[in-house]
Image: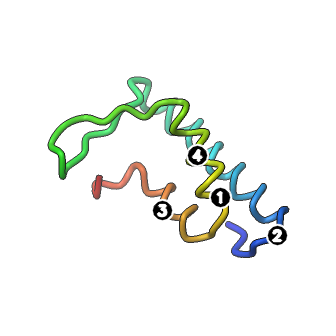
Amino acid sequence: MIPEGYTIEDIKKREQIIRDFYREWKEKNPSQRKFNLSLKEYINIRMVSIVETSEHAAKSYLSTLAVLQLDSSVL
């Protein structure tokens, strides 16, 4: 379950959820890239992006949910 609050503890838990998600995603996607349907080309998911995303997206519940959609075909 993803915490919805804004306490430091909630943010830290969401940050860990995002980092765990990325770790699993990287295992399944060793090339670390995703096809972007809008751009019609691959985009590279870099470690810098992962760190920044986990720190920023963890600040809100909805942003955390958005990150967890990385594998959806919407990109």
| Residue matched to label 4 | 21
| Of callouts 1 and 4, the N-terminal one | 4
**Mark 2 or 3: the one toward you:** 2
In the visual, does 13 lie left or right of 69? right
Q: What residue type is labelled 2?
A: Thr
In the visual, does 41 lie left or right of 19? left
Indicate the quadrant containing the N terminus: top left, top right, bottom left or bottom right. bottom right
Q: How crowded is mark 2: few (under 14 residues within 10 Å), some or many (20 or more)?
A: few
**Mark 1 or 4: the one toward you:** 1
| Of callouts 2 and 1, the N-terminal one | 2
Residue toward you, 58 or 20: 58
- Quarter of the image where one finds residue 50: top right
| Of callouts 1 and 3, the N-terminal one | 1
| Of callouts 2 and 3, the N-terminal one | 2
| Residue 44 image position (x, y, % from top left) | 36, 32
Q: Distance between the residues labelled 2 and 1?
A: 11 Å
**Element type at mark 3:** helix
**Element type at mark 4:** helix
Q: What residue type is labelled 3?
A: Ala
Chosen colour scheme: rainbow
| Residue matched to label 2 | 7
- Quarter of the image where one finds residue 10: bottom right
Q: Which amino acid does label 4 sit on?
A: Phe
| Residue matched to label 1 | 58
> Which residue is rendered at x = 82% and y = 70% of the image?
7
Label at residue 66? 3
Q: Residues within 10 Å of mark 3 (few under 14, many from 20)?
A: few
The image shows residue 3, relative to residue 35, as above or below, that is below
